[in-house]
């Protein structure tokens, strides 16, 4: 047993050294300076950061009234999810959940792809050299680590504001975990989805295996994708129900996602957020329990002035978007 554990440690140390060398090589390439003209152009094109949202791995900008655009912002690293990302997503969506001015969110990836998944080189020390001096303590550490990583995507689902994922190019591994926690998914024609974890020797553990079967409703297909790590292209993603629309390019997709967010944001936030909360509750509970929860929920929500405003606008044949709803 001791010999086996020593051999395992030696293998992990060797892998760590190889990953470190690879990381140093990648880092040296990424440090090439931009020309002055390119720097000026990048500065002009840089969107305005939303107040209270300053991050290393994310860029959060106010897209339109009541809408925030959250971008995975490591395009030079294919939006790989580093240590900062796993921490900052929780902080970001906890703030959005409490932001009474925000009513809808669009999440996308900067650059040519949505995300290449977990940044193995940045997280190698956490995963391959876990803390602890015996099996129990190492296991305790890893369980806590996995639970915190799970919360990175569960926080999207827990956020009462609808979240729309706009996916272009590759969406690999943890990228699939992320989008399955979103409420609506759009993608481009060149989008590629891949549940990649088995190929790196582990089972997906931060949401895909729990959420994907409920999204596409085809256990056989989920099993095939998870066991083989094969790629799912945009057309199959559409036909299976993983995404609801496919677009020819990223620009048109983002415009459509933001237009959808604006449509949602124009409606009663009481009604929209109540709907999201009850849809999620009903997904995870029997029909009778879902109905009982809905009755309890609406015994207070039916007293909102939003109903009076909405019905009055309908009776007066006014555009529903002209109704002003209070912040929530």
Image (cartoon, helix red, strand yellow):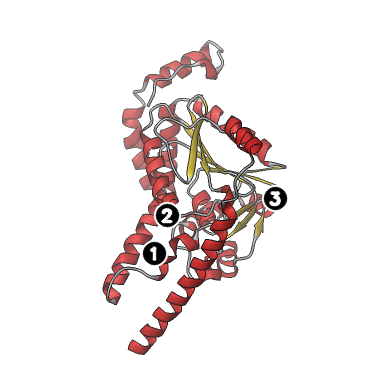
Residue 70, how many percent across, how many down?
50, 39
Tell me the distance, in whole angstroms, between the alpha carbons under discs 2 and 3. 28 Å
**Left of 78 or right of it: where is 145?**
left
Query: Reading the chain from its start, which is encountered first: label 1 or label 3?
Result: 1
Mark linked to residue 83: 2
Q: Nearer the viewer, mark 2 or mark 3?
A: 2
Residue neighbourhood size for the residue with mark 3, other residues' Cα within 10 Å, grouped as few (<14), some (14–19), many (≥20):
some
Residue neighbourhood size for the residue with mark 2, other residues' Cα within 10 Å, grouped as few (<14), some (14–19), many (≥20):
some
Q: Is 137 or 286 nearer to us in this picture?
A: 137
The C terminus: image quadrant? top left
The residue tagged 3 is 190
Q: Secondary structure at mark 3?
A: loop
Mark linked to residue 126: 1
Residue 228, how many percent across, how many down?
60, 69
Q: Is residue 241 above or below residue 60?
A: below
Residue 240, how many percent across, how many down?
63, 53
């Amino acid at each position: 047993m001791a010999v086996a554990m020593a051999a395992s440690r030696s293998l992990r140390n060797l892998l760590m050294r190889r990953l470190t060398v690879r990381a140093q090589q990648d880092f040296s390439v990424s440090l090439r300076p931009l020309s002055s003209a390119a720097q000026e152009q990048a500065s002009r094109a840089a969107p305005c950061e939303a107040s209270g949202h300053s991050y290393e791995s994310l860029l959060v900008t106010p897209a339109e009234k009541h809408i925030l655009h959250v971008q995975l912002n490591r395009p030079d690293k294919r939006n790989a999810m580093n240590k900062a990302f796993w921490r900052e997503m929780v902080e970001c969506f906890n703030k959005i959940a409490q932001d009474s001015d925000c009513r809808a969110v669009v999440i996308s990836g900067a650059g040519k792809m949505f995300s290449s998944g977990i940044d193995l080189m940045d997280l190698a020390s956490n995963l391959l050299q876990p803390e602890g001096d015996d099996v129990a303590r190492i296991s305790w550490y890893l369980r806590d680590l996995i639970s915190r990583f799970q919360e990175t995507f569960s926080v999207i689902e827990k956020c009462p504001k609808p979240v729309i994922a706009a996916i272009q190019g590759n969406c690999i591994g943890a990228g699939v975990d992320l989008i399955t926690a979103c409420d609506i998914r759009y993608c481009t024609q060149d989008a590629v989805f891949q549940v990649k974890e088995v190929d790196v020797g582990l089972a997906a553990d931060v949401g895909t295996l729990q959420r994907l079967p409920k999204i596409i409703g085809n256990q056989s297909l989920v099993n095939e994708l998870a066991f083989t790590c094969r790629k799912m292209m945009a057309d199959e993603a559409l036909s299976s129900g993983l995404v609801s629309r496919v677009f020819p390019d990223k620009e048109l997709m983002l415009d459509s996602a933001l237009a959808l967010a604006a449509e949602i944001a124009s409606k009663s936030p009481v009604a929209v957020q109540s709907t999201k909360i009850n849809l999620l509750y009903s997904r995870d509970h029997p029909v009778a329990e879902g109905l009982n929860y809905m009755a309890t929920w609406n015994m207070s929500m039916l007293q909102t002035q939003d109903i009076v405003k909405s019905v009055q606008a309908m009776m007066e044949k006014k555009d529903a978007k002209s109704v002003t709803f209070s912040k929530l």
